[in-house]
Image (cartoon, helix red, strand yellow):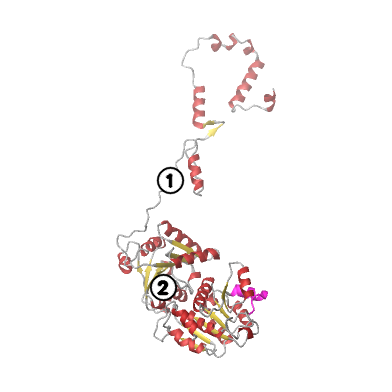
Amino acid sequence: MLPDIVDALAEVNIVHPFPIQRMAIPIALTGTDMIGQARTGTGKTLAFGITALQRIVVPSERDFELQARPGAPQALVVAPTRELALQVSKDLTVAATRRRARVLTIYGGVGYEPQLEALATGVEIVVGTPGRLLDLANRGSLDLSHIKVLVLDEADEMLDLGFLPDVERILAKTPELRQTMLFSATMPSAIVSLARKHLRHPVNIRAESEGDTTTVPTTAQFVYQTHDMDKPEIVARVLQAENRNRVMVFCRTKRAAARLADDLAERGFSAAAIHGDLSQVLREKALKKFRAGTVDVLVATDVAARGIDVEGVTHVINYECTDDDKTYVHRIGRTGRAGASGIAITFVDWADLTRWKVINNTLDLPFADPQETYSTSGHLYHDLGIDPAATGRLTPAPIRESAHRTAAGGEDSRRHEERRGERPRRNRNRRRLRNGLPVDQREEAATSQAAPDPEPATDPAAVDPAATDPAATDPAAVDGAKKRRRRRSRGGRTSPSEASA
């Protein structure tokens, strides 16, 4: 290895190589194609990163101007997710500190201009996701005709995400006489077929013995059968376990991740979410806070399950049972990295028991029948070192204002509910109106009008209208009075002709 690379790694306390690095680097430096397989968190990134850094020519060297096109990318690393691309680029930048190789990360979700400017200036190593790489290559902005080393990182994840057609198009744009290396923790048959098609007599390196388990032995695993409605309470208690540092919680859906992050924040925990519905800027911001320690609980979907190497992750929680054994291995691989110890906790619903048994048997785990567990179960506190006095909150629950209604129709309550974003509820205490009067008042008025006068009538006009009103004896006048009374009894409505009169 070049002294500049060794010194740069020593500055960040990387001195002793991992088995995959010790086995792969000497062979890769000869230019041989390679398939590298090792458990997650065991140093695969530097295994191919050191090789790429050592095989390129940097601007400070004398042979740089002798190249066919100085400044064109000489090494390409293809990663399945943006987060993994950023992680790989970060590791390569650290290793290239003294050699001063220019590393560019290319991925979607951000503007084109900074990437186009960096490509125009010149770079030696490009790390990117398949979609944006192919886009820039088709535009002619990314020249892949001078690639010496090509690496496919986490190739099995590219298969799961449907990126293999794009990867093959990228490979077709690179020189045929290149060095191709393929690294992954698992190696399904489709990836083996891809290797046979595009790699020339590859050397297959597996940095583990036949008896080694797929998961890292320094990670303690716990599997509990839990009810979906009790999971937030259990997570809140796990976050109060002894020796707990950073925690990653994996959810199956984007909505579940956002809802759980909000719930934990409302309980008083420092939590943030990262999922596909967030913009790339917000995803990077949340991950940056998690690395810095401003946020110590990261709730994520599988976008963060591959390649995210954050120091100090002591617990990983699978909020639901994973879809398959590969996802389980990569999720719990976020803890117990680089020889450190960690704890992996998996929640299994009753409907997922069959799926979990398949994963359990595939990985040869001793959790075929998970123990039924609730937030009050004693074995939960004992297994994870949780204080028995711990509750599901660090801060008291907020007091919600009750929606009081006023006699005038509940306007204060309606404004309060609208401020909270709720649909205003109906005021069931309101009084029904008929003809401008409440029903009860109208009935009372009608009853009082129909009631007889208790006082005896002494006025002759009251006894006999004809005694004072000669028109009362006129039949036409009597009929007109009856019609007027009939119209009044219909609610006081008058015809247009009467109104004009």
* Near-viewer residue (360 or 274): 274
Disc 2 crowd rating (10 Å Cα; few below 14, some 14-19, many 20+) is: many
* Main SS, magenta residues: helix
The Cα–Cα distance between marks 1 and 2, rounded to whole angstroms, is 42 Å
Mark 1 or mark 2, which has the lower sequence index? 2
Picture quadrant where residue 485 is located: top right
Q: Residue 78: where, in percent of width, then height?
A: 56, 77
Residue 335's mark? 2
Q: Quadrant of residue 218?
A: bottom left
Q: Is residue 159 above or below residue 259?
A: below
Closer-to-camera residue (210/285): 285
Q: Secondary structure at mark 2?
A: loop
Amino acid type of the residue tagged 1 in the rendering = Glu
Q: Which stretch appears magenta?
A: 130-143
Label 1 Cα neighbours within 10 Å, binned few <14 / some 14-19 / many ≥20: few
- Please say whether residue 465 is one of the residues in the magenta stretch: no
What SS does tag 1 mark? loop
Label placed on residue 401: 1
Would residue 93 be seen by someone viewing this image from the given angle? yes
The image shows residue 112, relative to residue 25, as above or below, that is: above
The magenta stretch spans residue 142: yes
